[in-house]
């Protein structure tokens, strides 16, 4: 992608203006680009369209960026098309679910690996996790607790809307184990003093042992978000909107559930967090999800192990952290390593 953002906007104007005319009966008089953000896996531009009736519509343009870390994902399928198509499927379905939504998609340009969606107003849910801190406002925490209930509810409907089916175990866990091994290789490259020398060998052996126990099983799979965390959730008075479906595909049901549970376990280890409050959030999330996970102990352990490895890499790769954040990261990393060494039971 060599075009600058102005060229890209100019390229999509005819379709965008046609969309507003056909769906909103609006004619455009001006378009203004508000902000552009370059991120590791995408470039995002926020822009506003002003119409002749003095209305304005806010949009987000997302361009997929190729990165060595997401190479296997972007090589499989055009991710702009993947994200656009899943939003197109989910948006009308979530319209009937109170407190849960996804952004409304507008158009996709596979050639340029970009798509456009309506802007979602609100607060990044991750920013509200400051209310898990000791002595933070109780009213704000209760709003966060409600959001975590909606998070569980959203996931339950998401798995329903994307459909559930059975796969052979070797196919069902292919991407899960591929992601785990990929992150283990990245961890090896960091050469951290906090990681045991034989950690990769130990963890891969752990995964292999779990797979042997379900070798001939049929595994229930459903839609998997890709990075189901508060970093990809927008909170507003109406509820919760989940964004950023890069890497969406079908995977075992526990993958997204364990992403949240491991995130909350890490959060509980923050020096200023109230463990009681974080546990309340975990209960709220599981209550929102409500259905018991249809998975064996081995399926859960494989998904949990992968998410713990992802967390280890995330905390190792964050550079220039403040001293207390580094101490928390070390504490979290040691906790995950101990889990593998002790072969604990699943969280939650």
Image (cartoon, rainbow, N blue to C red):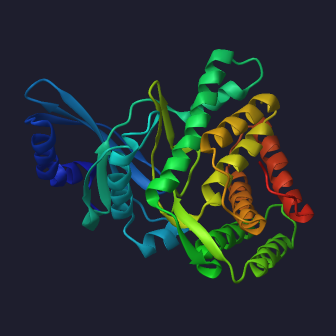
Confirm whether residue 22 shows in the render.
yes
- Depth check, front residue: 134 or 260: 260
Confirm whether residue 272 shows in the render.
no
- Expressed as whole percent of the image width and height from the top left, the position of residue 65 reads 41, 61
Does 39 sit above or below residue 145?
A: below
- Expressed as whole percent of the image width and height from the top left, the position of residue 6 reads 22, 48
- Depth check, front residue: 12 or 8: 12
Residue at 55%, 48% in the rendered image: 155
Q: How many marks do you count on the picture? A: 0
Give left or right: position of 145 versus 200. Answer: left
- Expressed as whole percent of the image width and height from the top left, the position of residue 238 reads 44, 27
Residue at 66%, 73% in the rendered image: 177
Does 153 sit above or below residue 221?
A: above
Q: Quadrant of the N terminus?
A: bottom left
Give left or right: position of 153 versus 59. Answer: right
Does 152 sit above or below residue 83?
A: above
Give left or right: position of 239 versus 270. Answer: left
Residue at 30%, 54% in the rendered image: 115
- Expressed as whole percent of the image width and height from the top left, the position of residue 293 reads 67, 56
Give left or right: position of 24 versus 241. Answer: left
Residue at 75%, 44% in the rendered image: 266
> Which residue sits furthest right?
342
């Amino acid at each position: 992608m060599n075009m600058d953002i102005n060229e890209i906007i100019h390229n999509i104007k005819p379709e965008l203006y046609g969309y507003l005319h056909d769906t909103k009966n609006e004619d455009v008089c001006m378009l203004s680009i508000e902000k552009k953000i370059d991120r590791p896996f995408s470039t995002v531009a926020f822009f506003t369209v002003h119409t002749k009736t003095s209305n304005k519509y806010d949009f987000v343009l997302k361009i997929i960026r190729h990165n060595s870390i997401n190479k296997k994902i972007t090589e499989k399928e055009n991710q702009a098309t993947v994200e656009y198509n899943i939003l197109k499927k989910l948006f009308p379905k979530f319209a009937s679910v109170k407190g849960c939504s996804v952004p409304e998609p507008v158009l996709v340009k596979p050639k340029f690996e970009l798509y456009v969606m309506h802007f979602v107003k609100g607060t990044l849910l991750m920013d509200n996790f400051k209310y898990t801190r000791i002595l933070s406002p109780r009213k704000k925490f209760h709003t966060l607790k409600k959001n975590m209930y909606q998070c569980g509810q959203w996931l339950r409907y998401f798995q329903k809307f994307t459909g559930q089916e059975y796969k052979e175990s070797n196919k069902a866990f292919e991407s899960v184990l591929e992601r785990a091994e990929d992150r283990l290789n990245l961890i090896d490259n960091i050469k951290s003093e906090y990681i045991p020398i034989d950690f990769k060998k130990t963890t891969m052996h752990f995964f292999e042992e779990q797979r042997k126990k379900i070798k001939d099983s049929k595994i229930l799979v459903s839609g998997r978000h890709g990075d189901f965390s508060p970093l990809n959730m927008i909170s507003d008075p109406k509820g919760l909107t989940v964004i950023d479906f890069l890497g969406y595909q079908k995977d075992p049901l526990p993958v997204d559930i364990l992403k949240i549970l491991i995130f909350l376990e890490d959060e509980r280890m923050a020096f200023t967090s109230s463990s009681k409050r974080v546990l309340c959030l975990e209960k709220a999330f599981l209550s929102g999800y409500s259905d018991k996970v249809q998975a064996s102990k081995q399926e859960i352990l494989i998904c949990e192990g992968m998410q713990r490895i992802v967390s280890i890499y995330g905390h190792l790769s964050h550079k220039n952290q403040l001293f207390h954040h580094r101490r928390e990261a070390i504490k979290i990393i040691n906790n995950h390593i101990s889990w593998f060494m002790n072969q604990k039971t699943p969280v939650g």
